[in-house]
Image: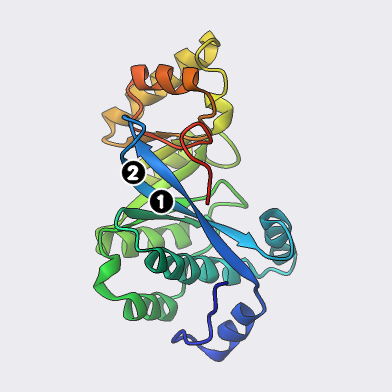
Amino acid sequence: MIYYDDLPLDEDILKALGELSINYVFQPIFQADGKTIYAWEALMRPTDMSVTELIDEYAKKDKLHVLEVATFFGAMQAYFLRGYTERVSINSFPSDCMKNEEADAFLGYFGEEIRGRMIIENLEYPYFSPEHWKEKDRSVRAMDNLLSVDDFGSGINDIEKVNLMNPHIVKLDRSLISGIDHIKEKQDNVRQLVLDFHSKGMLVVAEGVEEKEEFDYLVGLGVDLYQGFYLARPA
């Protein structure tokens, strides 16, 4: 269980965080050999409802910022408790970012150990805020961390958003990957995406790889990184 009691945050956000009952699991992101771990993605797991239900509940209350702060602090606590040394990938709402005082508290709490170890994944919902993105982009790059576009090809994350955000990493949604070993349209589409993103200096992650045949085909296309049940489940 993640506890937020001792965090150097103001009273209102601490009270809101104290109402959460959540854990975190981690799913590895592998290099192309399927064995070497590049990063661990932190995934929120509420104890009394699904993560979708929790996000829906907080969105209706206009309190997604609470989950944004909870994810950064909670995921990093869990990451360090597990003793991982590879990068940690943390989900972030494209409509939100931590306030300056919260970001300062985050750096003060975890220190220089977070420099160069984080990947911030901009989710595909609910909407994109250019103002919050600029602040997120500035703070992430200042700490030598990486920015990622999550679930490309679903929700709001399309070519326009990639060009606007200029991330280090693009994660291809499962809908683009499923059955790619035998569906020519998907093969042609992903091949072109890999070429385009590589030409911009971006790494490409295939998400939701569930079959050996999908993995083998994607390796042949030159996809850089892989995540999915075929390789490892969240734990």
Q: Quadrant of the N terminus?
A: bottom right
Mark 1 sits on what residue?
Answer: 40
Mark 2 sits on what residue?
Answer: 37
Mark carried by residue 56: none
List x then y, in percent, for residue 233: 53, 42
Q: Secondary structure at mark 1?
A: strand
Residue 74, visible in the rendered structure: yes
User: At 29% from the left edge and 29% from the top edge, which residue is drawn?
Assistant: 198
Lateral position of residue 20 relative to residue 229, left or right: right
User: At 36% from the left edge and 41% from the top edge, which residue is drawn?
Assistant: 169
Lateral position of residue 166 relative to residue 187, left or right: left
Q: Residues within 10 Å of mark 2 (few under 14, many from 20)?
A: some
* Amino acid on which the number 1 mark rests in the picture: Trp
Residue 163, quarter of the rendered image: top left
User: At 46% from the left edge and 66% from the top edge, which residue is drawn?
Assistant: 78
* Amino acid on which the number 2 mark rests in the picture: Ile
List x then y, in percent, for residue 202: 31, 37
In depth, the one of 235 and 90 nearer the eye is: 235
In depth, the one of 195 and 71 nearer the eye is: 71
List x then y, in percent, for residue 213: 48, 17
